[in-house]
Image (cartoon, rainbow, N blue to C red):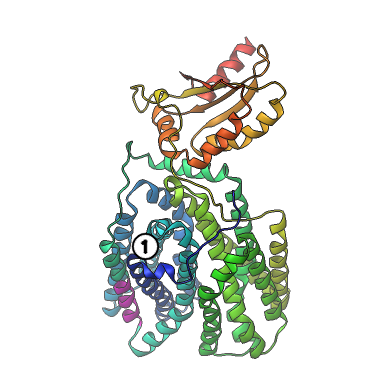
Amino acid sequence: MSAVPSPTADAWAPLRRPIYRGLLLCQFASNVGTWMQVVGAQWLMGDLTSSVTAVALVQTAVTLPVFLAVLPAGALGDLLDRRVLLIASQGGMAVVAAILALMTEGGMMTPWLLLSLTFLLGMGQAVVVPSWHAIQPELVPREEIPQAVTLHGVNVNFARAVGPAIGGLVIAAVGPAAVFGLNALSFGFSVIALARWKRVKVEQRFATEGFLRAMRAGGAYVRATPPMRILLMRLGAFMVFASALWTLLPIVARDRLDLSSTGYGLLLAAAGIGAATGVVTLPPLRRRFSTNAIIGLSSGAFGIGLLVLGLSHSVVPDVVVLPVLGLAWVATLSSMMAAAQSMLPAWSRARGLSWYVVVVMGGQAGGSILWGLVAEHPSLTFALVLTGAGLVGNSISGRWLPVNWLNVDLEVSQHWPQDDLDEELPDDAGPFHVRVRYAVQPGAAAQFRKAMEPVSRQRRRTGATRWVLREDPQTPGMFIESWYVPLWIDHQRQHRERTTMRDREIEEAALAFLVPGTEPAIERVLAEPPRRLGLLRRRARAS
């Protein structure tokens, strides 16, 4: 397994692919429209009511749906055709934005109606995010994924910088209804681009997985993948501390630097310019350094930038350090997203990335509340210095908790003996108790147990429960691996759709310790559910 990606493409390689280029440009327009929408909704809410809480609830209505709905949306992204799902969600958002524009122009808008329609747009965004990330490997070759993710990160952050400014200008010139109308138009562009994409359809062997079962399977995959768990831990820590920039920058601009809204927009633009430079600065770095090193350097640079921001009391140092912060933000998040993409096979990609989004949104929401309170008591400087120190610590933690691009083959292997899967059984038959017997070479028991540890995680990733490895007390050297699968269709999926070439390599490493000339003996029996078995054992002991 290689920890360092070796991309041969340059920074702009994904843009030479017409479908990717068209979708990226339309997504940029949509992102700009979204930020314009937020500004327009906040401004309109201020016109509709004098309540500060109502204005603050606009931001909640934007972010809360993503946090609540992104995990189910990730499951949908793996169950349904992602292209169709994206077209439907973007089309629905265009309709909602158009209704918002028409009702605002007609003078029919109320505070609760504005919040409700904004919430619906947030729900649409929750559906879009995991599927949009999940289609990236379908748009570009694997070696171009880091560049594609970086371009997407620049897209999002540059839109964050220019969207509010454009929205403010449109509101001043025409009014908020025009902002909502432009947002509806931006979604329409995305629908057209997606409709032009001729996605290669993947043949499904089995019926579509149930919604709740699909969500549980996605969570099981993340739990049983240690590199993904480490990534989410590091990501969560980064988001909690780094969220201080976006939370406290308005306070820095208004209270410390005494800037107007235009001055605040220029500070955001400085960060956006730094983010944009990531397109050309990150590819050379990726050719020289590991993903973990880039994350460590960028996280540390972000921390030092926050320290400067906290200790500075003038515009010049802030304007100088904000591009560094923008670049470090994009470098960290794009590197982590690319690493996450490398860990997830096609069957669980949207579900796995939805966990990534939950951590981003949850870390940003929780961090925003925390650092807002700290900035108020004891002080703004203390909050920025503390978050800067926290990010430097997160950078150092990479020595023990590395996050790297996994250069492994995640294509389906189908190496499990097919005669075990060819039996004609109803899909809902089960649960099944699967046992595999291994004749291990004398003196190799400890090495075999060690080699089976990643096999246990591989089984759990693909749907196994209650995995156990034990040695037969009556036959020294005979090891029995056992696990449960709930249904026959789950057993089929486990070995025909979910087990990858990397999983095959893991199993072959364990099989190297078997007695030469022997093969694993597979036994599968219809069993009582595990909980039922435990209940029966307890009753037997009691009697």
Front residue of 541/288: it is 288
**Whole-percent x and y of residue 42?**
44, 77
Please provide percent x and percent y for residue 27. 38, 69
Whether residue 371 is in magenta: the answer is no
Q: In which quarter of the view is residue 389 placed?
A: bottom right
Q: Is residue 158 left or right of residue 478?
A: left
Residue at (61% x, 78% y) in the render: 324
Closer to us: 481 or 539: 481
Q: Residue at coordinates 43% horizontally, 35% vertically from top-left?
A: 414
Q: Establish if 246 lies above or below 341.
A: below
Residue that mark 1 sits on: 120
Q: Residue at x 57, y 69 (%)?
A: 331
Instruction: Determine crowd level at label 1: few under 14, some 14-19, many 20+ residues with C-alpha closer than 10 A.
Output: some
* 163 to 398, vertically: above or below: below
Q: Which region shows up in magenta?
A: 176-186
Predominant SS of the magenta segment? helix
Is-magenta flag for residue 180? yes
Residue 417, position as x, y percentages in the image: 44, 26
Classify residue 80 as left or right of residue 236.
left
Q: Judge whether residue 244 can be spotted in this image.
A: yes
Q: Amino acid at mark 1?
A: Leu
Q: Is residue 307 left or right of residue 280?
A: right
